[in-house]
Every structure is written in C-alpha cells, then in structure tokens.
Image (cartoon, grey):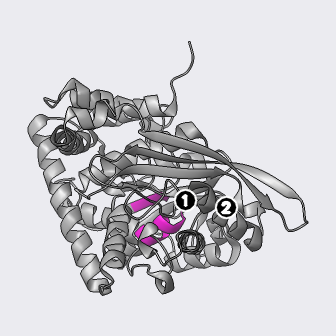
Amino acid sequence: MPEDSLLDSALVRLDEAARHINVDADVIEKLKYPRETTKARLMIRMDDGSRKSFLAWRCRYDDTRGPTKGGIRFHPDASADEVEMLAFWMTFKCAVMNLPYGGGKGAVQVDPRKLSKAELERLSRSYMQAFSRIIGPDRDIPAPDVYTNAMIMGWMADEYSQIVGHASPAVITGKPLALGGSVGRGDATARGGYYLVRHLFAELGLKGKLRIAIQGFGNAGQHIASLFAADGHSIVAVSDSGGAVQASGGLSLAALLAAKQENNSVIHTIGKDGHEALSADQLVGVECDVLVPAALENMIRIDNAETIKARVVLELANGPVTHDADEILAKRNVVVLPDILANAGGVTVSYFEWVQNKQGYYWELPEIHEKLRVIMEREGRAIWELASSRDVTVRTAAYVHALSRLAEAIEAHGTQSYFDS
C-alpha cells in the first residue's frame, strides 16, 4: 500500500475534530481537498549566463471565509504535497483566530542560500509572474515563510504592481515598512505565543521563573527567547541547523544573538558564558518547563516524545509534533499548545497589515501589540475552556473551534455555490 500523503496525515486532525461536533458530511467532504493547486516551472537567468529552472506551487485550499492567505517558502525539499498540507493548516489557523481569510500556501523547490542576491530577486519576480493570475489582494495574499523575508516580499509586491499597472500593497504582507509593511510584524509569531502562555500561565500549571528550551533559533526562536528573557525566565537550551547548546543556569541571550548575527549558528558560543555542547536530537529531552519547537515539521516524533520533560510544548513551527507523538504526550499529561493557535500571531498581524494597506492608514506599534494580545487571549481562552469542558486535548479543541466556524460559513454560502460549480 502507498504511504499516506502529508495532507492525509494532516486530515487526521479534521477527522478527530469531526467526532466532537455535529457537522454536515458535506462540510467534511469539502475540507478534505484543496480548492486549487497550481504548478509552474520558473526559468531564470543565472549570474554566469546560464538558465536554470525551479519547480513552484501555489495552493488555495479553501476560500469560504475570505481570500486565501498563506506564506511562500523557498526550500530544497518543497513539494506539492507539503504545500497542500500547509494550506490546510492555514485554513484552520485563520478560522481559529476568526480572521476573514481562507488558507493558502506557496513554495519554490530551491536552496536560496546557493543563490546570489540578484538571482534571488529574479526568482522572486518570476514566481509572481507565474502566479499573478491566482494571487491578488482580494483573492490570494502571500506572506514570508521558511527562507523568505520582507525583502523577497517587497520584490514580489513590486512585480505584481508592475503587472497590474498600479500600486497594490495589499497583495502581499510581511513587506518592508517602506513598501507598506506593518510595524510589529517581525516578532508577531513569537509575540502571539508569548501572550498565549502568559495568559494561560496558571491553567498550564506554570509557576515562578520558567526554564525555556527552543528548537530552532531563527526569527521566531530568537524573538520568543527575547520576550521570555525580558520577563526574567531562563533560556536553558537552543538549537539551530548548526547544532545545539545548553546551560542549566541559563544561556547568555546576548551571546546567542551575537553568534547568529556574526557566524549564523549558536554553536559558536560553546565554551563561553558556561555554554555546553548538546546534541540537536537531545534538545527535546532537556530539563525545562516549556519546550518551544520553532523549526520545521515532524521534529517531535514517536522516537523522542517519551524523552520530553517539559510541562508545556509551545508550537511556534507548523506541524512540529506528529500524530503519534501527540498521543504519547497526551498520555503523559504534557500540554501541547498547537500551531494553529500558538503561532497564529504571524497571520494575525499580517491581517492587520492588509487592513492598513486597504485603508491607507497605519497604526502605531502599541496599538498593534494590544490588538494582537486581545485576539490571542480571546481565542486561547475559548479553546482552553472548550478543551476542559469536552475533556479533549488543546489541539483537538482548536480544530473543533475552527471547524465550527468553517461549517457555519460553508452552510451559509449554500450547497449550490460550492459543490455544483
């Protein structure tokens, strides 16, 4: 028998949620498949004069609640299957936060670290040229993801504006401030997770000063470390693609950030400030109160879930805990704050950016932070209470919460609109 696709593995969450809510079978059938997935081959001129092609995709999974929303990642292992899985998660993430969006995602199969800046720009603009008929400020709105950033979003937004013949800043979020980006977007993913933990501190069984371990010290990992450290909590272990370090008494955040800036890896702090080497595979099992997976999918699996000593797992990455690992953690009473809630601060502030672009009026940073805090606390509280009342995991409660909103929207549109078109 063929192995299940990545999307099939994600749909397990949908099936689990459907067992806890009275929802029409047509709704489940609609949410099992992406609305459209488009594939393109991007051909660009390399700096040496040769031409090279790269596979690319854009998936609009579901647009029942509004334009599809989701990042574009540049990664050598990207695939259509992964893009559809991530777009499915975005559909539920936007519904969890009650944003007027559906879910989308895009990717290019490339290692951007091997491209020059000029090649990267040509690739980014080529992506927009290939998908400009799919993308649009009222149809499908991209954002940064793995190995993409504000600079790349700026190139894409500029290319789209050239294609349509007028400025259209709302087509993409996560842009540079000079091109209509929003203040507060840089740390939004981490800040949302931080607000969630702080709001549910007592309910999670947390007390006093916490010990935090972070798997993945990129944008989200660095910001969550800074936010927790500012409250006096200790960062006891971190890892990145180069390796991992630990210090039972707390790592030096300044040293970690400097090492990332200067040498691109935390391992360059080993031997300084009491930092000790740690196997990247061992990081999930360090003594800590909160474990923050902030890297890629499937980092916590059946083979390492038993080693986790944390009371709480805060999923800043998308899909870092496999279904089998989830079951192990639930039996061990480890609370997992799921990705579709825990890392939704990013898409929420992306929504703020889109709104600001639409109205041509921009908010100050304190207002962004306050709006984000209110939404994270509101939805986090609703999901926590749902989990408690239904005696289900927080992940299942989050999917039930989202599914109820999606079902209501699908039914409001009517069957004819979605099944006979």
Q: Quadrant of residue 162?
A: bottom right
Using the rendered view, name the quadrant where residue 396 is placed: top left
Number of numbered labels in the structure image: 2
Which residue is found at the position 45% from the left and 53% from the top? 317
157 above or below 365?
above
Query: Where in the figure is residue 375, as x and y percent of width and height?
Result: 21, 65
Residue occupied by mark 1 = 132
The residue that disc 2 covers is 126
In depth, the one of 359 and 75 nearer the eye is: 359
Q: Are marks 1 and 2 in contact (CB under 8 Å)?
A: no
Q: Quadrant of residue 190?
A: bottom left
Kindly give the residue lying farthest to the top in the view shown. Answer: 1
Q: Which mark is residue 36?
A: none
What residue is rendered at 85% in x and 57% in y? 51
Q: Is residue 9 in view?
A: yes
The C terminus appears in which quarter of the rendering? top left
Q: Which residues are magenta?
A: 212-225
- Residue kind at label 2, given as amino acid type: Ser
At a point 64% along the width and 64% down the height, the residue shown is: 124
State the SS at label 2: helix
Where 9 sits versus 155, above or below? above
Q: Secondary structure at mark 1?
A: loop
What percent of the width, then of the height, locates residue 64?
28, 46
